[in-house]
Image (cartoon, helix red, strand yellow):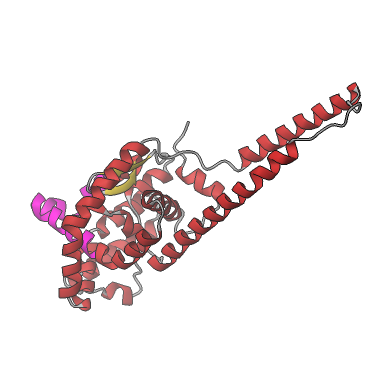
Amino acid sequence: MAGVLPAWPAFSDGETPQELVAASASASEVQEQESTLDFAIEPARAEAAVTIEPEGSSPSPSEAEEAGAASLASASSDALSSEENKPLTNRDPFESLNRRTFTFNRGFEKIFIDPVVDFYGWATPEIMQKGAHNGFENLGTPSVAINKLLQGRLRESGIASGRFVVNSTLGIVGIFDPAQRMGLVKQQADFGQTLSIYGLHSGPYMVIPLLGPTTVRDSAGFLMDFCFRPDTYLLTPSITMFLIGGYGLTLKEETQTALDALRANAVDEYAVIRSLYLMHRASQLRGGAELTEEELEKELYFGE
């Protein structure tokens, strides 16, 4: 059940869902304006291309050569401009399959998950929702500490380890967050990020049944992070899956309003989710920094 939208945990870290919705709506407006502008300009170009030469005014050979050279130069310039404005390298070679999986996930979510999320949000007091979220998140803190260590960030690894110890004891298995008040700020790291630091490209974009958006590299990273969780070894697999599903439920409830608004404004929901996931994931890999188009390409390009 964690399942259908694990992309949204990434969207909720340090970004308000409303900002994401506004960004996607703005992007749609820009695309519509550009499409309208192109529609208006193309006939004008066609008319300009048709010229009527008066009789007896055929160009001299030198003029014809100059015109040909000018036409070639213009064509080369247009080609270069087109090359510069080309979209980023295609990271979705499995788009057809991904779209079918996305449709399946969305249908499963509507039937089985949304009613549970709605009931949970209605029946559970906010303070209990916060405690449940903290407890589920605390179970993933050892994975953060290990990944920080593998990345060579010893201080941040120590902070994450300290958070786990303090919140698991004083915070009553993580329901409360006294570590934050002690200056042990929340850290973010995963094995996909670790692999990125060691130079492994992200690989193509993927949509996994019941899990949602990811990339080839990050799907492998998810399995390793699962192995880094203490409950993987201390509890039965069914209880561990229940806990992961519970964490997904709390995240889904937190982002439900933003998701509904995004879907209401999106012309192509699949494309919007893909763009938001890839952009935010690239930002995560750079420590939350905003990326230029070139930096985004560098972070997510998966090789020739």
Q: Is residue 246 left or right of residue 60?
A: left
Q: Is residue 13 left or right of residue 26?
A: left
x and y, in percent, of residue 33 in the image: 56, 55
x and y, in percent, of residue 185 in the image: 35, 69
Q: Is residue 19 visible in this depiction of the protein?
A: yes
Q: Is residue 59 left or right of residue 101?
A: right
Instruction: State yes or no: residue 232 in magenta.
Output: yes
Q: Residue visible at 26% across and 62% down? A: 252
**In which quadrant is the N terminus drawn?**
bottom left
Magenta range is 223-250
* Number of marks in the rendered image: 0
Q: Quadrant of residue 208?
A: top left
Task: Choose between 226 and 29: the one closer to the eye.
Answer: 29
Task: Choose between 105 and 220: the one closer to the eye.
Answer: 105
Q: Residue furthest top?
A: 61
Instruction: State yes or no: residue 116 in magenta.
Output: no
Residue 58, compared with residue 82, is above or below; it is above
Q: Residue furthest front?
A: 55
Q: Quadrant of residue 119?
A: bottom left
Q: Residue visible at 88% across and 25% down? A: 58
The main secondary structure of the magenta stretch is: helix
Q: Residue visible at 46% across and 38% down? A: 90
Q: Is residue 187 visible in this depiction of the protein?
A: no
Residue 238, compared with residue 18, is above or below; it is above
x and y, in percent, of residue 162 in the image: 28, 66
Residue 24, compared with residue 71, is above or below; it is below
Q: Residue visible at 16% across and 72% down? A: 172
